[in-house]
Amino acid sequence: MTDQPEQPQFPQQDPQPAQGILAEDRTVAILAHLSAIIAAVVSAGWLSILGPLVVWFVYKDKSLFVRQAAAGAFNFNLTIWVAVVAGW
C-alpha cells in the first residue's frame, strides 16, 4: 500500500445560475450599466443617470437582482455626475 493523500473531491458545477438569477435578469442588469455609458457618449455625459433610472423604474417590482444592479449603476453615475459638476 502507498500512503498517498486522498484527492479532494469537488462538487459538480450546477448548471443553474446561483440563487435563481435568470439569464434575462443578468442581461437587463448589464444593460442598466451599459445604458449609462451609451447615454454619456450620446449626451456628452449629462444624461448618464437616465438609463439606470429607467431600468430601475421598469424592473423595481420584477427582479431584486436587476433593481439592485440598476440602483448601483444609478448611484455610481450620480456620484460621478455631481463630482464633475463640482469640479467644473
Image (cartoon, rainbow, N blue to C red):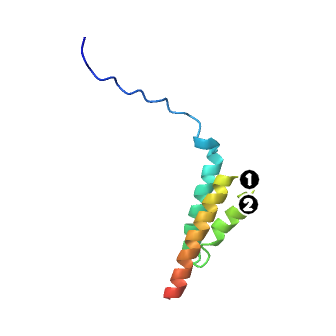
Q: Position of residue 62 (x, y in %)?
A: 74, 53
Q: Position of residue 35 (x, y in %)?
A: 60, 65
Report the number of discs. Answer: 2
Q: Name the residue beneath numbered marker 2.
A: 58
The vertical placement of 32 against 43, above or below, is above
Residue 4 shown left or right of residue 22 in the figure: left
Q: Name the residue beneath numbered marker 1.
A: 62
Q: Amino acid at mark 1?
A: Lys
Name the residue rendered at 68%, 62% in the picture. 55
- Specify few, some or many for label 2: CA neighbours under 10 Å numbering under 14, 14-19, or 20 or more: few
Q: Position of residue 65 (x, y in %)?
A: 64, 53
The vertical placement of 64 against 82, above or below, is above
Name the residue rendered at 62%, 72% in the picture. 49
Residue 24 shown left or right of residue 77 in the figure: right
Q: Quick one: 62 or 44, which is closer to the camera?
A: 62
Name the residue rendered at 55%, 75% in the picture. 79
Q: Amino acid at mark 2?
A: Val
Task: Quarter of the image for the N terminus: give it.
Answer: top left
Question: Is the residue under label 2 in contact with that under label 1 (CB below 8 Å)?
Answer: yes
Q: Secondary structure at mark 2?
A: helix
Check the image and name the residue furthest to the left: 2
Check the image and name the residue furthest to the bottom: 88
* Residue 44 in view, yes or no: no
Q: Position of residue 88 (x, y in %)?
A: 50, 88
